[in-house]
Image (cartoon, grey):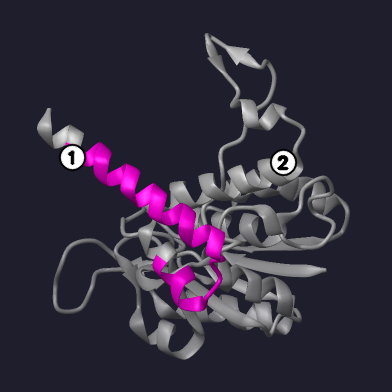
Amino acid sequence: MMRFDVVSLFPEMFRAVTESGITARAMKRGLWSLNLWNPRDETHDPHRTVDDRPFGGGPGMILMADPLAKTIDRIRASGNRGRVIAFAPGGKKLEDADIARMVASSDPLTLVCGRYEGIDERFLEDYVDEQYCIGDFVLSGGELPALCLIDAVVRRIPGAIKELSTEDESFSTGLLDYPHYTRPEVWRGNPVPEVLLSGNHAVVDRWNRDKALEATCKNRPDLIKIARSCGSLSKDDLKSLREIVRRMKESAEKGDAA
């Protein structure tokens, strides 16, 4: 069983993964567990204070080191001595490879959700092993990134998804996913691509791969560069890429001419 311990001032937000969808079903199957810890429980003043003004001035409030440290000490005493992860805009961008590593190790994780202007640096230095962000934007706190990480990890735990191979999903192949269609065959005058109705699995597989290459080339060209450098693109892939790039250039030139 994969264990998560989450340190948050708003533990109620984590009902999203315990009460709904794939993660809730996986929890019922005993594939993972979640313990929620509020650092306010480690305070003793009437206001249960967990933040204060920053030394040196500046806007906002800073989460104090002591309530967080005492919470981590309690988590460790309860049996989770795994890695401690915090979320911050300056952290490493969370990638699929990080998720795969966490699933492969199945070690327990402690997720610290910051709030306000940030967390006292002394706590980060003494207690935190890794810091992550989920994009180049600022959120109100670390709860949403923590939910993203939990969801991404749990869905890759064997048995969490019965009818779908996670290896076929976006990023697992190094590319974005190809487009998907379902009934009806024609929706508002827009038909499903004929190739998907052909029954020729080899042709369909090639079409799916080409569409994945096209989507990646348009939206995440950085992934194409990585795939090239890793040698994970076949001769057919490279041929398709040349055609995709040619069409993209033609389309851009027509747009400029207009």
Spot the residue most to the right. 29
Task: Give the extent of the magenta segment.
Answer: 225-253
Residue 126 falls left or right of residue 174: left
Residue drawn where x is 60% and y is 23% of the image:
192
The reply to whether the magenta stretch includes residue 245 is yes
Q: Which residue occupies the foreground of this view, 221 or 62?
A: 221
Classify 73 as above or below 254.
below
Classify 164 as above or below 131.
above
Residue drawn where x is 67% and y is 48% of the image:
17
Q: Which residue occupies the foreground of this view, 17 or 252?
A: 252
* Label of residue 92 in the image: none
Classify 156 as above or below 23.
below
The reply to whether the magenta stretch includes residue 247 is yes
Kindly identify which residue carries mark 2: 21
What is the chief secondary structure element of the magenta stretch? helix
Residue drawn where x is 26% and y is 46% of the image:
249
Residue 116, percent from left and from top: 33, 60
Does the rendering let one see residue 107?
no
Locate the N terminus by quadrant. Answer: bottom right
Q: Which quarter of the figure has residue 203?
A: top right
Spot the residue most to the top. 188
Residue 123 falls left or right of residue 186: left
Kindly identify which residue carries mark 1: 253
